[in-house]
Image (cartoon, rainbow, N blue to C red):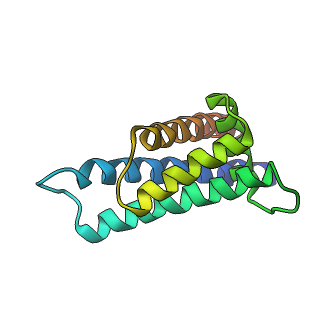
Amino acid sequence: MTDRWFLSKDAMKGLDLVSVCINTLFAIEQAGEEKKVLSEEELQNNMARGELLFKKLRVAAEGQIEKGVEVDPVIFRLVDELRKELRVTPSQLVKKLMRAEDDLNRAQASEETVKLLEKISDIAKSWTEKKVAALSSSIH
């Protein structure tokens, strides 16, 4: 039973990451539109959640450079996979994440920020699919 709970909890974290990425990408798209589906408050909230995600990732990436930084293991693993996917060093990733964080703070997004959000979403989606498959097989 405990194994199923951990699988479920990890799957939910993956879904949360995907959700933040998708909502932030939608807010970025909506920010440039005249006719908006989202209210200004929703746009700001989605951008703020994306900015917070980039901040958490940046802190975790800094934890790969400096000792003594405590972060959520899921975020640390995401940073590690993101770094490998992008083929960058931890310090290069920190710089990319700082730029993305700054973009969203200004309610803007460069192409690099959009690509980072898409890559993070792809990684989290892959994890979630595996966790759901494992959870499904453990139930049946």
Q: Can the viewer see residue 5 in this picture?
A: no
Which of the pair 6/118 is nearer the observer? 118
Q: Position of residue 87 (x, y in %)?
A: 67, 28
x 47%, y 54%: residue: 20
Residue 131's image quarter?
A: top right
Residue furthest bottom in the image? 41
Q: Residue at x 65, y 48 (%)?
A: 94
For image coordinates 79% across by 49% down, the residue present is: 3
Check the image and report above or below for 27 versus 86.
below
Image spot of residue 90 (x, y percent)? 73, 42
- Residue 14 is situated, as x and y percent measured from the top left of the image, at 59, 47
Instruction: Please identify the quarter of the rendering in which residue 63 is found.
Output: bottom right
Screen quadrant of the C terminus:
top right
Residue at the location (24% across, 68% down)? Answer: 40
Q: Residue furthest right?
A: 67
Query: Whole-percent x and y of residue 118?
Result: 47, 38
Instruction: Report if residue 127 is visible in the image.
Output: yes
- Residue 69 vs 25, above or below: the answer is below
Quick check: 106 left or right of 33? right
Above-or-below relation of 64 to 107? above
Apparent side of residue 113 relative to residue 136 in the rendered image (left or right): left
